Image: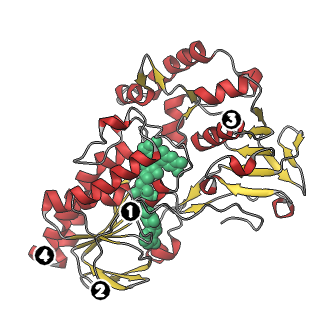
């Protein structure tokens, strides 16, 4: 939850020229998918095209892939376009190695049309409950019943800001990175960006390039800094090549390479990360930060890297090393939470972090599936593509077992899965 305090809000998402294919409620599809982001669209495509299963994708936004429309200006994909498409349709080559936000929005809109995905937009699912032969979804537009459901609500539902002591007394502006559009409102102001991921890096650079007076970047865990490309090839292609090599073998090579590429950055506030790059992704879910522009700006003194935020006072921020800074605004690039409690929390299907049990793609209950939760090692979009087909196959097998021999067969099917 966002703490109380002044918050800079974005304007509503750009609607582009998208014309939704809307159905009327109540409907009874075989499968209802909650979320029309990349995960929901991918599974819908695989169910309809691969298994001819009538599928309805429901989203509370008025447009599909809304999270991509609300990314900050100048956003470019961090992973390469070549590896980041959804099943069955490539991102046009004209979008280049790192497609922009606009390229991705055009791509997702075209995906919905060309893959003929049925959407119910502007419809929030508030709660999911079991019925005798499937699921009932209570939505803002009425009730939907389906034999199976797929949770695809994304990992970015609710912006989170740590409960720094004293933050409620901060008299400056407090903004979450999810609400940052561009640097113009911060011209001539002193800004503290909190975080060390890709959003934090992009925002700090945008501020430094566009007239903020002073930019600090508060870093808690030193990130792995990587270049967007090496020898002309996007860095995620190298990660892809090393996908099957264990972290203990590949990490020392990456560390040596990074020292050669960047030199020693500890004098600029970037200490050595506690774990190797691949181990950080696998064990902590921390993806590397693309840092070409960030490192240039830090070396040029346009961004100052400082210690983690410890506490906040009316007009200054106390840092972990005892120093303090006096920003006019704090931009917290401190992550998001899934916020699934109200929707399915009562069904006992969530783990301690509030994610559906079972990892990135899973069957979490009898006839309930989930895709897109967790941090995959080589890019979420790529992982969504790779997992959508097997998950759709699982959903189809579940429905077939249910319709051939009724509920007993479904239970047997689940029993088989559990035993191997
Ligand atoms: C700043 C940023 C940059 C990123 N860059 C990359 C990148 O370069 N490469 C990459 O691979 N990944 C990137 N990602 C990750 C990216 O967000 C995911 O790859 C992708 O969007 C996840 O898709 P999803 O469908 O699982 O979730 P989302 O895209 O979050 O979609 C979830 C959908 O569910 C809907 N929804 C949620 N709750 C409900 C409800 N109760 N009722 C109805 N609808 C609901 C939402 O409106 C939303 O449309 C980035 C993420 C962020 C935040």
Q: Which mark is residue 209?
A: 3
Instruction: Tell me which residue sits at (68%, 64%) in the image.
Output: 2
SS class, disc 2: loop
Q: Alpha-carbon distance for marks 3 and 4?
A: 60 Å
Quadrant assignment, res 276: top right
Q: Assign ligand 1 to one image quadrant.
A: bottom left
Q: Nearer the viewer, residue 139 or 278?
A: 139
Q: Give me the C-alpha separation between circle 4 and circle 1.
A: 31 Å
Residue 397 disc label: none
Looking at the image, tell me whether mark 3 or mark 4 is earlier in sequence order: 3
Residue 348 in view in this figure: no
Residue at the left extreme of this rendering: 404
Distance of label 2 from label 1 (alpha carbons)? 20 Å
Kindly identify which residue carries mark 1.
Answer: 64
Q: Are marks 2 and 1 in contact (CB under 8 Å)?
A: no
Q: Disc 1 beta carbon < 8 A from ligand 1?
A: yes
Q: Disc 2 or 1, which lies upstream in sequence?
A: 2
Choose mark 4 or mark 1, whichever is in front: 1
Q: CA distance from mark 2 to mark 4?
A: 22 Å
- Where residue 111 sits, quadrant-wise, is bottom left
Spatial separation of the CA atoms under disc 3 and disc 1? 32 Å
Residue beneath disc 2: 26
Residue 271 at what x, y percent from top left? 70, 27
Q: Which of the two discs, 2 and 1, sits closer to the camera?
A: 1
Q: Image check: 272 left or right of 342?
A: right
**Relative image position of residue 274 (x, y in whole percent):** 64, 31
**Tag 1, which secondary structure?**
loop
- Depth order, front residue of 282/12: 12
- Residue 403, disc: 4
Could you tell me which residue is drawn at 50 percent across and 69 percent down?
Answer: 340
């Amino acid at each position: 939850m966002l703490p109380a305090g002044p918050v800079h809000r974005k304007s509503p998402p750009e609607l582009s020229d998208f014309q939704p294919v809307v159905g009327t409620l109540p409907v009874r599809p075989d499968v209802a998918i909650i979320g029309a982001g990349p995960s929901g669209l991918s599974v819908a495509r695989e169910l309809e095209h691969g298994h001819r299963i009538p599928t309805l994708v429901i989203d509370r936004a008025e447009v599909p892939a809304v999270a991509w429309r609300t990314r900050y200006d100048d956003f470019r994909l961090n992973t390469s376009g070549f590896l980041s498409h959804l099943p069955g349709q490539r991102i046009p080559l004209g979008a280049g190695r790192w497609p922009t936000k606009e390229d991705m929005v055009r791509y997702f809109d075209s995906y919905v049309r060309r893959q003929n995905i049925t959407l119910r937009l502007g419809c929030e699912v508030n709660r999911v409950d079991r019925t005798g032969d499937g699921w009932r979804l209570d939505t803002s537009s009425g009730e939907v019943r389906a034999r199976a459901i797929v949770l695809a609500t994304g990992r970015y539902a609710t912006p989170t800001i740590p409960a720094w002591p004293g933050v409620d007394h901060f008299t400056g502006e407090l903004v979450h990175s999810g609400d940052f559009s561009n640097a113009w409102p911060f011209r001539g102001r002193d800004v503290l960006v909190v975080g060390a991921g890709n959003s934090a890096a992009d925002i700090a650079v945008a501020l430094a390039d566009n007239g903020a007076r002073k930019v600090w970047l508060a870093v808690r865990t030193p990130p792995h800094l990587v270049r967007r490309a090496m020898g002309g090839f996007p860095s995620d292609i190298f990660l892809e090549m090393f996908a099957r090599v264990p972290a203990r073998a590949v990490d020392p090579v990456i560390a040596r390479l990074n020292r050669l590429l960047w030199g020693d950055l500890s004098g600029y506030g970037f200490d050595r990360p506690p774990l190797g790059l691949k181990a950080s992704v696998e064990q902590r879910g921390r993806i590397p930060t693309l840092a070409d522009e960030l490192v240039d700006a830090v070396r040029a003194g346009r961004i100052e890297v400082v210690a983690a935020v410890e506490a906040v006072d009316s007009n200054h921020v106390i840092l972990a090393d005892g120093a303090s800074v006096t920003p006019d605004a704090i931009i917290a690039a401190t992550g998001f939470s899934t916020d699934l409690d109200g929707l399915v929390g009562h069904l006992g299907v969530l783990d301690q972090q509030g994610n559906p049990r079972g990892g990135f793609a899973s069957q979490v209950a009898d006839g309930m599936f989930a895709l897109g939760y967790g941090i995959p090692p080589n890019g979420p979009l790529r992982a969504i593509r790779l997992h959508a087909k097997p998950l759709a196959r699982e959903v189809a097998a579940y429905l077939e077992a249910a319709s051939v021999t009724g509920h007993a067969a479904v239970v047997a099917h689940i029993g088989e899965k559990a035993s191997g």
